[in-house]
Image: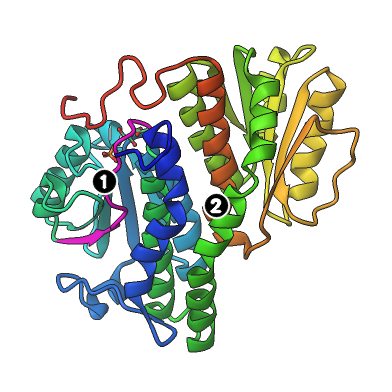
């Protein structure tokens, strides 16, 4: 059942190219995005002027990437909330709002409660769900299935990639409907999205370098992740992944916030993983890494193929394929998921079933 892999988590990471392909290709036709959501016709989507993305854990982190994509491509303001906060906040809704719920299982109690709250207030809801026929899929006004196939490992990996894929499709669609993207730009995004499964595979093919990095980090009890913009959201997801499967204490920081407190924790040998895949932010994040390096940190950098790196700076370099900036999370998360997996294995953890965690959180 594990298809020759020692754990479901590893199998599911290796299934990512296929899952993303299955999710994207039926929804792209002749250079156009076709979402096929009957309850949300184009004129309704064209009128949406504010989006709330609500989810928990990894699904919420996918939502953070979705915010960057939708705001960049469609210029619609997006708020991302943790479901257990959103539902108790008495959120402010207006007429043309859309609430997007993201959930792999479709059964997460707080996400379901947030969905019901939005419906009660008369706001349109769209669910991005993996498990067919699940509660959230049934109750939302409309659903976009992620079609990743079953995800068994407690730690979510391939589900995150397909959640991103659907959010990119939605961002392109909204960009067109809101007059922000030309037909040519839509066709370019469609083509590049269809190329992503191959790039995800290239990222997976770097596994040997990731294993040597895992060996470097396996005995560390504290790991910091820093990045800016969309890379910061990847840090948040990577930090969650590593802590849940390896029981290592991890923190994700916006690189620019480091100086405002956290840098006091850096001492000789403290591992700091920098994620820097955005050309416009690259020099800034690298300069933050230089600061921690000068205080003794062990620096690991995730950057793109071809980016210039001073060989003195890092102990390990994890390269990812060069793709359009906004799409880079689809490839940049891969080494970080594999790193979490391999560190957990080296530490002898029960990777597929970490202590105290459940695959589907149906209690609040
Ligand atoms: C982390 C993880 C959890 C889930 C969260 C939401 O690896 O799996 O953080 O992402 O419990 O679950 P779903 O997506 O089923 O609503």
Residue at the extreme front? 4
Q: Quadrant of residue 146?
A: bottom left
- Is 25 left, or right, of 240 in this rendering? left
- Is 149 contained in the magenta span? yes
Residue position marked by numbered label 1 in the rendering = 150
Q: Quadrant of ligand 1?
A: top left
Q: Residue at x 46, y 47 (%)?
A: 14
CB under 8 Å between discs 2 and 1: no
In the rendered view, would you say 343 is above or below 129?
A: above
Q: Which mark is residue 329?
A: 2
- Is 329 contained in the magenta span? no
Q: Quadrant of residue 156?
A: top left
Tell me where residue 209 appears, x and y as whole percent. 69, 38
First in residue order: circle 2 vs circle 1: 1
Q: Is most of the magenta stretch helix, strand or loop?
A: loop
Q: How much space separates mark 2 and mark 1, taking CA atoms? A: 22 Å
Q: Is residue 61 visible?
A: no
Q: Residues within 10 Å of mark 2 (few under 14, many from 20)?
A: many
Q: Which residues are magenta?
A: 142-155
Q: Which mark is residue 198?
A: none
Q: Nearer the viewer, residue 175 or 94?
A: 175
Tell me where residue 97 appears, x and y as whole percent. 26, 60
Name the quadrant of the C terminus.
top left
Q: Secondary structure at mark 2?
A: helix
Q: Secondary structure at mark 1?
A: loop
Tell me where residue 292 appears, x and y as whole percent. 79, 25
Q: Nearer the viewer, residue 84 or 343?
A: 343
Q: Residue at x 45, y 37 (%)?
A: 10
Tell me where residue 253 appears, x and y as whole percent. 60, 30
């Amino acid at each position: 059942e594990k298809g020759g892999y020692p754990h479901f988590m590893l199998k599911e990471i290796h299934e990512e190219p296929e899952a993303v392909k299955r999710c994207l290709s039926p929804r792209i036709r002749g250079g156009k995005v076709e979402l096929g959501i009957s309850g949300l016709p184009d004129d309704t989507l064209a009128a949406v002027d504010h989006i709330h993305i609500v989810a928990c854990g990894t699904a919420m982190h996918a939502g953070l990437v979705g915010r960057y994509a939708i705001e960049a491509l469609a210029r619609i303001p997006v708020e991302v909330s943790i479901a257990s906060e959103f539902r108790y906040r008495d959120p402010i809704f207006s007429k043309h709002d859309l609430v997007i719920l993201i959930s792999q299982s479709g059964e997460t109690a707080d996400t379901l409660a947030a969905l019901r709250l939005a419906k009660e207030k008369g706001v349109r809801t769209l669910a991005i769900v993996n498990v067919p026929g699940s509660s959230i899929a049934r109750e939302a006004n409309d659903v976009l299935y992620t079609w990743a196939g079953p995800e068994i490992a407690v730690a979510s990996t391939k589900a995150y990639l397909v959640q991103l894929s659907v959010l990119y499709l939605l961002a392109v669609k909204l960009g067109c409907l809101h007059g922000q993207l030309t037909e040519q730009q839509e066709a370019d995004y469609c083509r590049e999205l269809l190329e992503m499964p191959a790039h995800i595979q290239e990222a997976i093919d770097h596994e040997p370098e990731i294993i040597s990095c895992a060996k470097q980090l396996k005995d560390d009890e504290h790991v910091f992740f820093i990045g800016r913009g969309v890379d910061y959201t990847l840090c948040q997801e990577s930090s969650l992944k590593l802590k849940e499967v390896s029981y290592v204490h991890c923190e994700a920081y916006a690189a620019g916030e480091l100086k405002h407190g956290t840098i006091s924790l850096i001492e000789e040998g403290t591992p700091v993983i920098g994620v820097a895949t955005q050309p416009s932010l690259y020099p800034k994040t690298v300069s933050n890494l230089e600061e921690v390096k000068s205080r003794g940190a062990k620096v690991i950098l995730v950057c793109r193929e071809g980016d210039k790196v001073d060989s003195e700076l890092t102990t390990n370099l994890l390269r990812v394929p060069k793709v359009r900036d906004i799409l880079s999370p689809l490839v940049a998360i891969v080494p970080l998921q594999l790193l979490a997996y391999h560190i957990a294995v080296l530490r002898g953890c029960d990777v597929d079933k970490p202590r105290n965690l459940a695959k589907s959180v149906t209690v609040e």
